[in-house]
Image (tube, rainbow, N blue to C red):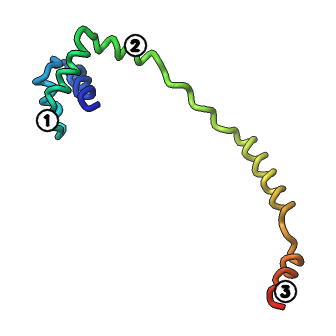
Amino acid sequence: MEYVYGALLLNAAGKPIDEKSLSGVLTAAGITPDSGRAQALLASLEGVNIAEVLAKAETFSAPAAAPAPSEKKDAKAEKKEEEKKEEKGVSEEEAAEGLSALFG
């Protein structure tokens, strides 16, 4: 993937995308370039207008994120949770009876 990023960086800088330039970018990033991988990338980019491809990619947008829940829904949910907690709650007397069974 770093080879593709290097090619994109060279394109953005307006530099020629060739093996020497790509190797230079990779070396500057601390990556030991592999001549075979660089040549494979360059062969796949042959005849490709990168600027055009990027422009087309920008027209596609990611799906919109789901809208945040409204505060009204949150308030209703909180009320329901409180009601459930109250219904399931144990009275103090019941709790005390349970404790007395432990201590005889």
Which labelled disc corresponds to residue 100?
3
Q: Measuring from the top left, give residue 23's x and y in whole percent.
A: 13, 29
Q: Given the image, on which type of amino acid does mark 3 rest?
A: Ser
Q: Given the image, on which type of amino acid does mark 2 rest?
A: Lys
**Contact (Cβ within 8 Å) of mark 2 with mark 3:** no
Position of the N terminus, as image quadrant, is top left
Residue 92 is left or right of residue 73, and the answer is right
Please determine whether, in this image, residue 53 is positioned above or below residue 99: above
Local SS, label 3 = helix
Q: Nearer the viewer, residue 60 or 73?
A: 60
Which residue extends farthest left?
20
Which residue extends farthest top?
47
Cα–Cα gap, marks 3 and 1: 75 Å
The mark nearer the N terminus, 3 or 1, is 1
Q: Nearer the viewer, residue 19 or 28?
A: 19
The mark nearer the N terminus, 2 or 3, is 2
Q: Which residue does the numbered mark 2 point to in the structure image?
A: 56
Q: Measuring from the top left, give residue 34's x and y in whole percent.
A: 16, 31
Q: Given the image, on which type of amino acid does mark 1 rest?
A: Thr
Query: Which residue is depicted at the point 12% across and 30% down?
Result: 24
Q: Quadrant of residue 52?
A: top left
Q: Nearer the viewer, residue 53 or 43?
A: 43
Which residue extends farthest front?
36
Q: Measuring from the top left, give residue 30's x and y in whole percent.
A: 17, 40
